[in-house]
């Protein structure tokens, strides 16, 4: 963070101090009564112009037009924007006009948060506005907002730098109000799912985030240390094994919206911290779960869009039931010509090499099949499609297929070429489960750092008996991307993980002096936005000359004014 204050930041801090000198707290603690929202006013007032004649509203100043004894401003609350009409003699009915002439005109800025009271009317230009009778300062902003201009429905100088938007989401939400709509929809998606589960009588639960064994998925975990117990602990990669313990304990159906953590790569569809919903229901199988999953997703689409058809970039995706269903074998056979059911590990390895799929000796049969499907098949499934009946080697927690040897009762739902949900008829044979865990251990010994750990306590729970159960997990972040027309996971996470912010490289005083800048001008040079030698060399000499002399005059500094040729010499040296 740059500790050098800009001219605007200095002026705003001075304004906050001047407010205090006037007896106005720029950061008051008291409750401010709000009885209206901008969106309600704009939608309801045209229907009945007797409404909102004693309105109290609060928000952020987003623009101002000062015009002598009367001015306009734009106020933004959590729900939208509305125009304010501020007349000097209305907010200052007595002799003292300080609130208008000094506070509003000179000490308030774009970005400040205020409360206003007044009544709603329509201006001569036909715009619904609030005629302000009273203003209260609620928060003085000491850092200026990016200036985003809007005219005739077009936005200019928008705050669009994606890294800055993700890193400073608070600022993104202020100046790009449409971003907020994505996160309102995200909450609606989760609430729609929660209502759907609760209607079935299933119980929402919470399971540990810190785990002694990172089970329930094939992924690389984050490791931490518990000082008091002096043991390593892992951040949750999945909550599956804990939820199935609860099925053993006698719950019919349990679900959880969980924050999971995987110490893996970051890209447009992966964040190391993400949200997953997992649900487990006793006495069900994967066929039932397919029907349940598509009904749930169809309901989400309808709740958000009032239609099952959702636009995603240039594609239209239809979540209307029933979804397409294709076996893993048929999918790979269709797109590669290989029949994986007749191939051993070596043949699969050779096939991957022949198809230029990157593999290595640590990969077992299941991982090789997964690589083939990921490279050659999954991107074809744009419309919702269940891929089902996976090989046993790919599914260490899944029940064996009831009819076909070597397969498991598992499906994944693919939409827009990406996995969205994963579900099983859950394995409840404790002996079979232990054997599959041991197979995963062998993969670890071969160097597969994503193979599952053995969870002996989970095996012990199965030994007491778990009823036939089906479970399903769905990535909430990816579901939100699909439902809100976003192609990057960072756009549906309020605070996505980012690389460390680069500290700006600031030139020293000595470096500026070497360029010929006198010591007394260096502070003003920095205030004008020149902090690096590169900035100085690329500066427009005429603009820099005018800026520096303007700052000298504004700050009433007792130094001789610059000449244009001096500035040119600094730039050329």
Image (cartoon, grey):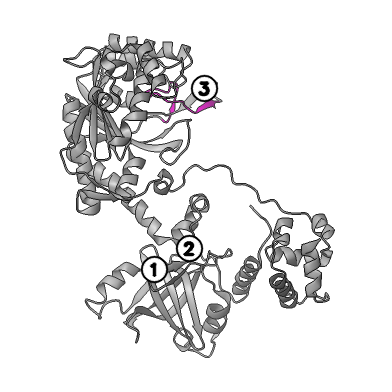
Quadrant for the C terminus in the image: bottom right
Q: Give the SS element for disc 3.
A: strand
Who is closer to the viewer here, 534 or 380?
A: 380
The circle on residue 158 is: 2
Which residue: 49% across, 60% down?
159
Q: Quadrant of residue 190?
A: top left
Which residue was labeled with disc 3? 232
Which residue was labeled with disc 1? 33
Whole-Å distance between the Cαs marked 3 and 2? 47 Å
Mark closer to the chain start, 3 or 1: 1
- Where residue 66 appears, as percent x and y from the top left, is 51, 82
Mark closer to the chain start, 3 or 2: 2
Who is closer to the viewer here, 411 or 555?
A: 411
Q: Vertically, is 67 above or below 78?
A: below
Q: Which residues are magenta?
A: 209-226
Q: How many marks?
A: 3
Discs 3, 2 touching: Cβ within 8 Å: no
Q: Quadrant of residue 408?
A: top left
Regarding residue 362, the answer to whether it shows in the image is yes
Give the crowd class for mark 3: few <14, some 14-19, many >=20 residues within 10 Å: some
Regarding residue 474, the answer to whether it shows in the image is no
Whole-Å distance between the Cαs marked 3 and 1? 50 Å
- Where residue 302 appears, as percent x and y from the top left, is 20, 50
The mark lying in front, picked from 3 and 2, is 2
Q: Is residue 331 magenta?
A: no
């Amino acid at each position: 963070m740059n500790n050098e204050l800009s001219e605007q930041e200095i002026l705003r801090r001075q304004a906050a101090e001047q407010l205090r000198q006037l007896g106005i707290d720029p950061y008051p603690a008291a409750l401010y009564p709000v009885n209206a929202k901008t969106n309600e006013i704009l939608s309801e007032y045209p229907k009945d112009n007797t409404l909102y004649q004693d309105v109290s509203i609060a928000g952020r100043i987003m623009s101002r037009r000062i015009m002598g004894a009367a001015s306009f401003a734009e106020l933004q609350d959590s729900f939208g924007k509305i125009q304010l009409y501020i007349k000097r003699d209305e907010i200052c009915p007595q002799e003292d006009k300080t609130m208008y002439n000094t506070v509003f005109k000179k000490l308030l800025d774009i970005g400040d948060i205020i409360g206003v009271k007044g009544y709603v009317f329509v201006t001569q230009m036909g715009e619904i506005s609030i005629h302000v009778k009273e203003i209260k300062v609620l928060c003085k902003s000491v850092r200026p907002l990016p200036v985003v201009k809007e005219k005739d429905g077009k936005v200019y100088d928008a705050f669009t730098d994606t890294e800055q938007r993700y890193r400073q989401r608070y600022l993104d939400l202020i100046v790009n109000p449409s971003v907020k709509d994505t996160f309102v929809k995200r909450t609606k998606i989760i609430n729609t799912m929660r209502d759907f589960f609760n209607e079935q009588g299933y119980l929402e639960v919470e399971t540990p985030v810190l785990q002694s064994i990172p089970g329930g998925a094939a992924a690389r975990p984050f490791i931490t240390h518990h000082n008091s117990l002096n043991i390593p602990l892992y951040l949750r990669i999945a909550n599956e094994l804990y939820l199935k313990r609860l099925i053993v304990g006698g719950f019919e159906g349990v679900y959880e919206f969980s924050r999971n953590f995987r110490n893996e790569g970051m890209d447009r569809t992966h964040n190391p911290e993400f949200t997953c919903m997992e649900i487990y229901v006793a006495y069900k199988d994967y066929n039932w779960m397919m029907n349940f999953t598509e009904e749930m997703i169809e309901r989400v689409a309808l709740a958000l869009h009032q239609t099952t058809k959702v636009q995603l970039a240039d594609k239209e995706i239809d979540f209307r039931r029933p979804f397409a269903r294709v076996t893993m074998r048929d999918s790979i056979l269709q797109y590669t010509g290989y029949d994986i059911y007749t191939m051993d590990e070596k043949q699969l390895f050779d096939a991957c090499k022949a198809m230029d799929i990157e593999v290595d000796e640590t990969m077992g049969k299941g991982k090789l099949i997964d690589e083939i499907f990921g490279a050659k098949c999954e991107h074809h499934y744009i419309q919702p499609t269940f891929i089902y009946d996976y090989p046993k080697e790919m599914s260490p927690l899944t029940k064996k297929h009831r009819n076909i040897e070597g397969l498991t009762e598992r499906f994944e739902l693919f939409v827009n070429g990406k996995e969205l949900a994963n579900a099983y008829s859950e394995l409840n044979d404790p002996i079979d489960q232990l054997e599959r865990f041991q197979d995963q251990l062998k993969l670890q010994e071969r160097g597969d750092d994503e193979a599952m750990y053995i969870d002996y306590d989970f095996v012990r729970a199965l030994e007491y008996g778990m009823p036939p159960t089906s479970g399903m997990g769905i990535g909430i972040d990816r579901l939100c991307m699909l439902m809100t027309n976003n192609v990057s996971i960072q756009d549906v996470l309020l605070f996505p993980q980012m690389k460390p912010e680069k500290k700006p490289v600031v030139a020293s005083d000595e470096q500026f002096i070497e360029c010929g800048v006198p010591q007394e001008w260096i502070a003003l040079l920095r205030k004008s936005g020149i902090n690096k030698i590169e900035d100085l060399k690329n500066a427009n000499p005429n603009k820099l000359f005018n800026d520096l002399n303007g700052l000298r005059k504004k700050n009433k500094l007792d130094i001789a004014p610059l000449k244009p040729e001096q500035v040119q010499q600094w730039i050329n040296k």
